[in-house]
Image: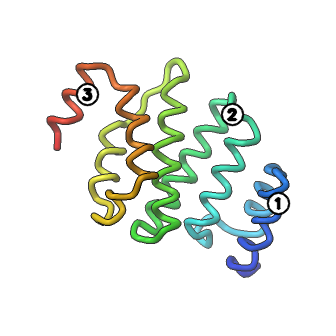
Amino acid sequence: MVSIQNLEFELQDLLKKKKYSEIIFEITTKTKEEERNAGLFVLLGISRMSSNKKNKSQIELALSDFKKGYLKEKTSENGLNALVNFVLASAILSDFENTNIDFNEIKDFYQKTPENFQNKRTINIAMTTIYSRLSDHEEMLFHLKK
């Protein structure tokens, strides 16, 4: 297959040009899921969400991409980017009707990140979007399960 680093570099240009469907096509046809690094998962997820922000199934696919990217590289900067996007996509998805978001999974991922990641502004802003969507009862339970 193709070199992952070269593909990432090529896709950056397509991202600047907002050619999201081309990015999705390139990643899904040139790589197998197990070959993708967190950076490719992030690009794939961002492209899915950017191509149709109001399509619940695209948001769900993007959420899955971000989760895979985070789980693949929990301690890298790309892993942090995947986690931030996972949290934000979860918040967006929670705004759709009949959607269940596992807020405890999000909290667990956040708590298991390296301490230096927990001090980064991007992840803390993303987590704020989750807190803002919790009801008072859910928020109380969210904090109690630490």
Q: Residue at x 58, y 70 (%)?
A: 37
Q: Is residue 110 left or right of residue 15?
A: left
Q: Which mark is residue 139?
A: 3
Cα separation, mark 1 vs mark 2, equals 18 Å
Q: Is residue 130 left or right of residue 20?
A: left
Q: Quadrant of the N terminus?
A: bottom right
Q: Position of residue 65 (x, y in %)?
A: 57, 53
Residue annotated with mark 1: 14
User: As shown in the figure, which amino acid type bears the numbered disc 2?
Assistant: Lys
User: As shown in the figure, which amino acid type bears the numbered disc 3?
Assistant: Glu
User: As shown in the figure, which amino acid type bears the numbered disc 1?
Assistant: Leu
Q: Position of residue 121 (x, y in %)?
A: 41, 53
Q: Quadrant of the C terminus?
A: top left
Q: How many marks?
A: 3
Cα separation, mark 1 vs mark 3, equals 40 Å
* Image quadrant assignment for residue 71: bottom left
Residue annotated with mark 2: 53
Work out whether residue 89 or residue 26 is closer to the camera in this orientation and state it. Answer: 89
* Image quadrant assignment for residue 131: top left
**125 is higher (above) or lower (below) than 7:** above
Q: Earlier in the sequence, mark 2 or mark 3?
A: 2
Q: Residue at x 71, y 71 (%)?
A: 8
